[in-house]
């Protein structure tokens, strides 16, 4: 079964949201809403660091990658935006070269927005399961650069950060095992990072019904219920949404792990930022199960259950 052998993160400087107000074009009311209601404190942002450098920072924090590099077959980059660097730069290939992984096949997945990281993890495991070498690995890279105001704010929804994650994935192993993954696309319209009024209304109408559906399917696939979940790792967009998701699944709020207040919403990297925080704080014991959820603009709903 697909497993995460090691998870590492890279956190650029954390900037207080209040200091970003003018740069992000936020009104006083919008700033208060993001801070007091949604729970934002600081957002990871470094204008001087490129997309490739952000990803490379996470990859270099993988302590076992240097010794395991010959076993890496794939370098998989999950991206929310359709572009992240000027042509002809290819950040995933840049990271592969810098880490001595030129022998690996590098590619990028997109069009699932912030729910794409779970899809990329599942796909990496599928590719490795078909490899004749049971020790073959994949390097998953998640997170991205926020270019310009349009990519730093999703109106009324989130403030985007630049923290990244790197994950060593195997087809099997005793480390964090993917027990079940479910995803469901629901077209809602709109353009790029914004939704018009009609799209926003449709998204709101289908959100919780679809969320409940994919979570129920993921739990059923793992033969578990919400009461069996030791921790809930939501997407880092709003503490209100995280609390509602936990409540609807029967998970106490005390079991939510979210780095939202420290990092902002860092695209698909949220899952692994939260997991790294849980591991560093010793909040997972061997055998514990945890639930991960993600929702991507567009929209794509995803949920996964892991065993630590």
Image: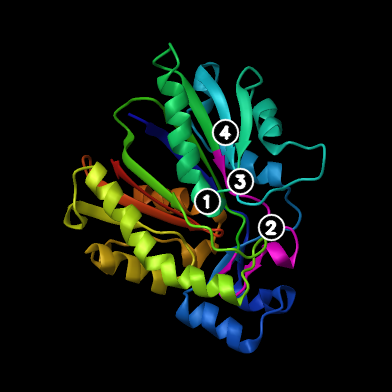
* Residue at image location 27% in from the left, 67% down from the top: 248
Residue 78, image quadrant: top right
Numbered disc 3: secondary structure: loop
- First of labels 3, 1 by sequence position: 3
Q: Position of residue 123 (x, y in %)?
A: 47, 33
Residue 256 in view of the camera: yes
- Magenta segment: 141-159
The span from disc 3 to disc 2 (Cα, nearest Å) is 12 Å
Crowdedness near tag 2: few (<14), some (14–19) or many (≥20) residues, C-alpha within 10 Å: many
Identify the residue at the far bottom of this view: 29
Instruction: Give the left or right position of residue 129, taking residue 196 as reference.
Output: left
* 142 in relation to 135, above or below: below
* Residue at image location 69% in from the left, 30% down from the top: 93
Numbered disc 2: secondary structure: loop
Crowdedness near tag 1: few (<14), some (14–19) or many (≥20) residues, C-alpha within 10 Å: many
- Residue under numbered circle 1: 268
Numbered disc 4: secondary structure: strand
The span from disc 4 to disc 2 (Cα, nearest Å) is 20 Å
Residue 76, labelled with which disc?
Answer: 4
- Residue under numbered circle 3: 79
Residue 104, image quadrant: top right
Instruction: Give the left or right position of residue 229, taking residue 162 as reference.
Output: left
- First of labels 4, 2 by sequence position: 4
């Amino acid at each position: 079964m697909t497993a995460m052998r090691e998870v590492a993160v890279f956190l650029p400087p954390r900037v207080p949201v209040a200091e970003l107000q003018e740069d992000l074009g936020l009104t006083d009311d919008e700033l208060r809403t993001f801070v007091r209601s949604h729970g934002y404190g600081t957002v990871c942002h470094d204008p001087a660091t490129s997309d490739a450098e952000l990803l490379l920072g996470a990859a270099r924090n993988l302590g076992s990658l240097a010794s395991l590099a010959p076993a890496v077959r794939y370098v998989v980059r999950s991206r929310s935006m359709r572009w992240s660097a000027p042509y002809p730069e290819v950040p995933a290939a840049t990271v592969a070269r810098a880490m001595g992984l030129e022998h690996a096949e590098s590619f990028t997945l997109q069009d699932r927005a912030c729910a794409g990281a779970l899809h990329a993890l599942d796909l990496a495991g599928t590719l490795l399961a078909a490899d004749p070498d049971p020790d073959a690995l994949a390097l998953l890279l998640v997170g991205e650069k926020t270019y310009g105001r349009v990519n730093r704010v999703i109106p009324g929804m989130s403030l985007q950060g630049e923290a990244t994650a790197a994950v060593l994935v195997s087809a099997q192993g005793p480390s964090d095992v993917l027990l079940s993954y479910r995803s469901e696309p629901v077209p809602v319209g709109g353009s790029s990072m914004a939704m018009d009024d009609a799209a926003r209304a449709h998204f709101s109408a289908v959100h919780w019904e679809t969320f409940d559906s994919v979570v129920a399917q993921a739990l059923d696939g793992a033969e578990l219920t919400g009461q069996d979940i030791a921790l809930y790792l939501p997407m880092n967009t709003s503490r209100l949404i995280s609390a509602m998701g936990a409540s609807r699944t029967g998970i106490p709020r005390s079991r939510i792990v979210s780095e939202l207040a420290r990092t902002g919403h860092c695209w698909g990297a949220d899952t692994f930022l939260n997991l790294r925080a849980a591991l560093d704080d010793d909040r997972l014991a061997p055998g514990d199960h945890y639930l991960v959820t993600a929702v991507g603009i567009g929209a794509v709903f995803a949920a996964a259950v892991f065993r630590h």
